[in-house]
Image: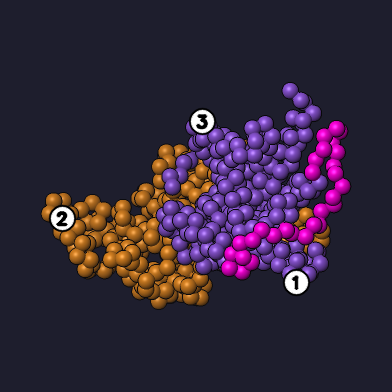
Chain colours: A orange, B purple
């Protein structure tokens, strides 16, 4: 259930009682939380908790079996993925999804694809002041993104040849080129070394500060989540077991049990049984 | 060795290879965007030719109307096929979709025989009939003009897909579907687009092939050579389709001239086997083998 919003600003994104089932397997059951505009919201949870399923549901790749997703108060549960992208939901993927044969710049340009309105004749002739201005604006945005993410030196490199960390950065650049209102990052620092992780953390903070983009991310790196986020949502076995400020969540006994176990060997077995019976209880 | 004869034969081979290249481009377009191996490409070609026959010979429409009408009609059929047969199979194993296109080929042949009977027909002549001389070599006018038409259409398609955003969307979809979705590309619409353009290109080559050799319900056999072309060139390579088309055209012409007409297909299939042994992914294809 979505928490009723408090204060003056309504939430930018509301996930309201979302349930997702694949056949008999429940990937998500009754997941609800809000993303406030200008916030960095993180979804955490052990492997298989349903984080990526949740992401795919929010960005429209999966259609939930129950519940609603609201973007700026508008129900987008039935809106197809490409249209959600055009509405302002930009995302990256856990297993990088880039146009591998193309260069970094081409990938970023494709991020602008959704906003272009030119047809084939315009592209061939390219006349008109408005279009020139649009082209300028576009170049401007591309340059800002390239500058901002420090990928100038690789702009003409084919993405397939880049390191994992740089590919993640290009994916983020492409998502930013869409000028999204929410930037959704699926495990932005997974598999990165310390230095790359710190760079990425800095970029995420700057995205919010300089670009005013709201960030929703899924992440394993607890340290980073606790440092960056304003709001943390903890998933376990497809359910929200806790949410709140990082410190509150960290102190939550349920979260500690989910992550570390209770120290009792039987605990894990009981937990598995509970999941198999798919009768989840105890929503925090 | 008669060099003048060899030159003449090679010229004819390359010119008729242009048509293979055009039809192969139609095949590659669908494979690249949707990963569907369209076995029915030869039959689509045939439908294009028969529609042209209907509009020009039966309804007596002028050429400038009959050709676009036939091409558009085939494009419409492409859209219909995509929407009713291919899209419902999204996510099914490639072999299922492959089998559907095999069936589609038979259905199209059956339909053509029901509507137009299995008799051989002649298409109205629309190409100039003065013989073409290249130096000393003679080139059959229909073959020459067919090659010109093929080159014009190939160039147009390449240009349009280079600069038009639909073409960019197609290349992006071919590269990574999830990523294409995430930047707002309507992937199902790209699939439709690929099928429509492919069917229209097939119709153009069908009209030309039909006016060179006449049309019949077995002209889908042309598709066999097109399949050889795309397998030789690499299923997902536009460059491969073009080079492979010219190459197979050349091989067929040489085999036909020096060994006799019955060796044409034998020669192309020997080439196919030889290339598959050395480069199973084709000359220019992506190094990823799909087992069907």
The chain identifier of the residue carrying mark 1 reads B
Local secondary structure at mark 3: helix
Magenta stretch encompasses residue B120:
yes
Left or right position of A265 against A173 = left
Left or right position of B19 against A104 = right
The residue closer to the viewer here, B209 or A260, is B209
Q: Determine the residue positioned at 22% across, 62% down.
A: A275
Labelled disc at residue B59: 1
Figure quadrant of the N terminus of chain A: bottom left
Magenta stretch encompasses residue B115:
yes
CB-based contact (under 8 Å), mark 3 and mark 1: no
Tell me where residue A141 appears, x and y as whole percent.
66, 53
Tell me where residue A23 appears, x and y as whole percent.
31, 65
Q: Looking at the image, is mark 3 or mark 1 nearer the viewer? A: 1
Q: Which of the 4 image quadrants contains residue A209?
A: bottom right
Q: Is residue A50 above or below residue A73?
A: above
The residue closer to the viewer here, B270 or A65, is B270
- The magenta segment is B113-140
């Amino acid at each position: 259930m979505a928490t009723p919003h408090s204060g003056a600003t309504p939430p930018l994104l509301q996930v309201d009682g979302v349930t997702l089932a694949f056949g008999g397997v429940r990937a998500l059951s009754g997941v609800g939380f809000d993303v406030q505009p200008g916030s960095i919201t993180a979804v955490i949870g052990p492997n298989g908790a349903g984080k990526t399923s949740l992401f795919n549901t929010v960005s429209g790749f999966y259609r939930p079996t129950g519940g609603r997703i609201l973007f700026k108060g508008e129900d987008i549960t039935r809106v197809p993925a490409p249209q959600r992208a055009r509405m302002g939901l930009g995302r990256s993927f856990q297993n990088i999804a880039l146009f591998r044969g193309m260069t970094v710049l081409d990938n970023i340009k494709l991020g602008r694809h959704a906003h272009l309105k030119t047809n084939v004749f315009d592209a061939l002739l390219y006349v008109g002041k408005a279009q020139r201005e649009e082209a300028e604006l576009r170049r401007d945005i591309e340059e800002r993104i390239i500058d901002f993410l420090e990928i100038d030196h690789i702009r003409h490199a084919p993405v397939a040849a880049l390191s994992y960390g740089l590919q993640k950065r290009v994916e983020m650049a492409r998502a930013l080129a869409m000028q999204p209102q929410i930037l959704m990052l699926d495990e932005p620092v997974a598999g990165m070394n310390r230095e790359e992780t710190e760079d990425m953390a800095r970029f995420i903070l700057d995205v919010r500060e300089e670009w005013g983009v709201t960030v929703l991310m899924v992440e394993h790196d607890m340290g980073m989540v606790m440092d960056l986020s304003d709001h943390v949502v903890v998933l376990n076995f497809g359910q929200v077991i806790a949410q709140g400020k990082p410190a509150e969540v960290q102190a939550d006994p349920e979260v500690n049990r989910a992550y570390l176990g209770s120290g009792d060997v039987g605990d894990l077995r009981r937990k598995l049984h509970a999941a198999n019976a798919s009768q989840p209880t105890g929503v925090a | 060795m008669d060099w003048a004869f060899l030159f003449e034969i090679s010229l004819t081979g390359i010119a008729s290879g242009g048509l293979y290249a055009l039809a192969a481009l139609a095949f590659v377009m669908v494979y690249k965007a949707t990963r569907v191996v369209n076995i029915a490409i030869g039959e689509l070609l045939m439908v294009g030719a028969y529609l042209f026959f209907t509009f020009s010979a039966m309804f007596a429409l002028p050429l400038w109307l009959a050709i676009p009408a036939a091409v558009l009609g085939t494009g419409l059929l492409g859209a219909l096929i995509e929407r009713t047969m291919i899209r419902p199979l999204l996510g099914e194993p490639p072999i299922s979709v492959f089998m559907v296109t095999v069936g589609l080929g038979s259905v199209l042949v059956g339909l053509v025989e029901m509507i137009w009977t299995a008799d051989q027909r002649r298409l109205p002549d629309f190409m100039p009939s003065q013989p073409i001389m290249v130096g000393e070599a003679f080139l059959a006018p229909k073959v020459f003009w067919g090659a010109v038409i093929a080159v014009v259409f190939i160039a147009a398609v390449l240009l349009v897909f280079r600069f038009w955003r639909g073409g960019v969307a197609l290349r992006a979809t071919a590269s990574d579907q999830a990523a294409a979705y995430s930047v707002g590309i309507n992937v199902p619409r790209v699939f439709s687009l690929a099928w429509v353009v492919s069917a229209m290109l097939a119709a153009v080559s069908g009209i030309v092939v039909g006016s060179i050799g006449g049309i019949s319900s077995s002209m889908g056999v042309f598709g066999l050579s097109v399949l050889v072309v795309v397998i030789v060139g690499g299923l997902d390579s536009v460059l491969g389709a073009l080079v492979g088309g010219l190459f197979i055209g050349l091989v067929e012409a040489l085999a036909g001239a020096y060994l006799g007409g019955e060796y044409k297909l034998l020669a192309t299939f020997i080439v196919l086997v030889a290339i598959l042994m050395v480069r199973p992914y084709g000359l220019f294809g992506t190094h990823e083998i799909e087992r069907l």
